[in-house]
């Protein structure tokens, strides 16, 4: 599987982070402790790895379809979502203070909540609407891959509720809707008797 070679603002790549997780080697180990882009990237790659391990005890070809397009799509979107993105203004008690959070941090929050849902893997995540305007109605669009056998409507409804609570707790966004599209149903390997 090929990992995109795009470079983050800090100069490092998703491929370097993936190699670090595989080998423990990184050109600048101290950088990993301080760079939010690299830390988000490592967290996302770890969650993706965990989700992949849970969904597959064998490689994808042995699991059934032999098609790993869903994983390639996740990696392609992951590199886009690791960018800081737009600055989202936050309220401040002091008029002279300017507080913001990044769109990338909100996308990472959506992804982390989604990855805690059993049998679910976040695909593309997007915030629709002008997040730079306080109070503007925002729609969260989430593409989701689920393991075969999970109740689709129940999974989506429960996840929508959890995402709404997490976004209300950790952001000041006016979330008008959370649209979840199940784009893939992944066949899990059958256990041998």
Image (cartoon, rainbow, N blue to C red):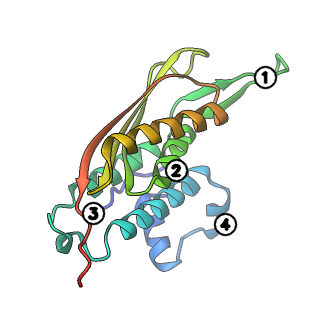
Relative height, residue 94 to residue 111 (above, below): above
Total marks placed: 4
Q: Which residue is mark 3?
A: 2
At label 3, counting other C-alpha atoms closer than 10 Å, the crowd grade (few under 14, some 14-19, many 20 or more) is: few
The x, y position of residue 127, in whole percent, is 45, 29
Residue 132 location, x and y as percent? 56, 20
Q: Quadrant of the C terminus?
A: bottom left
- The residue sitting at the bottom extreme is 193
Of the residues under marks 1 and 3, which one precedes in the sequence?
A: 3
| Residue under numbered circle 2 | 112
Q: Considering only order in the chain, which callout, 2 or 1, is on the residue closer to the N terminus?
A: 1
Labelled disc at residue 92: 1
C-alpha separation, residue under disc 1 versus residue under disc 3 = 44 Å
For marks 4 and 3 on the same chain, the one whose residue lies earlier in the sequence: 3
Residue drawn at x 31%, y 70% is 56
Mark nearer the N terminus (2 vs 3): 3
Q: What is the quadrant of residue 154 in the picture?
A: top left
Picture coordinates of residue 131 (x, y %)?
Answer: 53, 22
Q: Residues within 10 Å of mark 2 (few under 14, many from 20)?
A: some
Instruction: State which mark lies toward you, 4 or 2.
Output: 2
The residues bearing labels 4 and 3 have C-alpha atoms spaced at a distance of 27 Å
Q: Nearer the viewer, mark 1 or mark 4?
A: 1
> Who comes first in sequence, dot 4 or dot 2?
4
- Mark nearer the viewer, 1 or 2: 2
Residue located 50% across and 55% down the image: 41
Separation of residues labelled 2 and 3 (CA atoms):
23 Å
The answer to whether residue 160 is above or below residue 14 is above
Q: CA distance from mark 1 to mark 2?
A: 27 Å
């Amino acid at each position: 599987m090929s990992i995109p070679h795009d470079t983050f603002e800090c100069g490092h790549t998703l491929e370097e982070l993936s190699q670090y997780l595989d080998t423990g080697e990184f050109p600048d180990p101290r950088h990993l402790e301080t760079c939010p882009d690299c830390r988000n990237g490592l967290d996302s790659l770890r969650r993706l790895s965990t989700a992949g391990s849970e969904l597959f005890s064998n490689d994808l070809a042995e699991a059934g379809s032999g098609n790993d397009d869903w994983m390639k799509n996740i990696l392609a979107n992951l590199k886009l979502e690791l960018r800081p993105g737009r600055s989202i203004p936050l309220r401040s008690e002091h008029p002279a203070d300017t507080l913001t959070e990044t769109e990338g941090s909100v996308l990472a929050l959506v992804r982390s909540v989604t990855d805690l849902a059993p049998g679910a893997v976040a695909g593309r995540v997007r915030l629709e609407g002008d997040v730079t305007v306080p109070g503007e109605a925002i729609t969260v669009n989430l593409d989701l891959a689920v393991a075969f056998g999970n109740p689709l409507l129940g999974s989506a409804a429960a996840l929508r509720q959890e995402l709404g609570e997490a976004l209300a707790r950790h952001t000041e966004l006016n979330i008008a809707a959370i649209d979840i599209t199940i784009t893939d149903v992944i066949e899990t390997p059958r256990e041998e008797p």
